[in-house]
Image (spheres, rainbow, N blue to C red):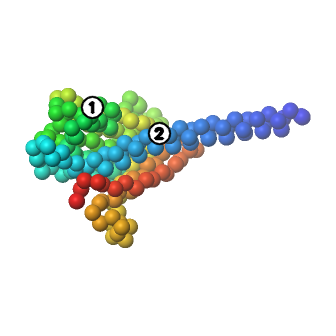
Amino acid sequence: MLLNPLLRTSADLAIKQIEYEKTQALISEAERAFELIGRAIRMAGYRNITRPRASKHALLELKKKTGFKGSDALIVRHDISDGMDFDCVGNVITKERMQNHLALQGFLVDRQVGVPKGKKVNGGSLICQSLDRHGRMQNTTLMNGVDRLIIEELKGAQALHSSAQRLFRVSLHMTDGGKTHLQLERTFATRNLL
């Protein structure tokens, strides 16, 4: 009888520690995703003045409610610099990895690959889209446990201080499939879209 309260407290402490570690892992993954998405938004529309003018494709496309659980999708196009540029998975962007003189990076949430139908999943997968060495679209999973990706362009009073830039609020809804649910958001500004 004396050990029962101690064992219960130890079990509760272990459960809380596991929940804390899951939360920290989800936050760490989300921060990495925010870094990649923010970098892509800042690069949208970049033009290297030493190269021929790129084609007139949309430089930043926001597709609303097209992914897993109504998630949004983002596609960014930009030129490359004279130095080394990287896509969202760390591949060096070369002329072969471009279409119409533009590099492409996309972000969307899709159903987790390899999970049989009917099996419970811990959210969807955040997918990075980029071009391979032959200029074809390739999808790479960045992380799992994403319930939704919501991207809103801020207009009006929210964006008054930044008239030459476009502002985007990016929200990630994360889950471990159990008790842990997080909603994290960041705001990013374009640098090259005028």
Of the residues tagged 2 and 1, which is closer to the observer? 1
Residue denoted by label 2:
29
Q: Is residue 171 above or below residue 26?
A: below
From the viewer's side, name the closer residue of 194 and 60. 194
Q: Residue furthest right?
A: 2
Looking at the image, tell me whether mark 2 or mark 1 is earlier in sequence order.
2
Q: Residue at x 37, y 42 (%)?
A: 36
Q: Is residue 136 visible?
A: no
**Whole-percent x, y for residue 134 in the image:** 17, 29
- Vertical arrangement, residue 22 with respect to residue 191, above or below: above
Relative side of 84 to 147, left or right: left
Q: Is residue 162 left or right of residue 132?
A: right
Residue 92 marker: 1
In what element is the residue under mark 1? loop
At label 1, the amino acid type is Val
- Estimate the x, y position of residue 59 in percent, counting from the top left: 21, 50
Image location (x, y in percent) of residue 123: 45, 41
Amino acid type, callout 2? Glu
For mark 2, give the secondary structure: helix
**How many tags in the picture?**
2
Q: Callout 1: few (<14), some (14-19), or many (20+) C-alpha neighbours within 10 Å? A: few
Query: Badge 2 local density, few (<14 within 10 Å), some, or many (20+)?
Result: some
Tell me the quadrant of the picture where the N terminus can be found: top right
Residue sitting nearer the eye, 73 or 111: 73
Q: Residue at x 22, y 45 (%)?
A: 78
The quarter of the picture where residue 141 lies is top left
Asked if residue 6 lies left or right of residue 89, the reply is right
Q: Return the x and y of residue 157 as percentages of the image width and height.
A: 37, 71
Q: What quarter of the picture does the C terminus occupy?
A: bottom left
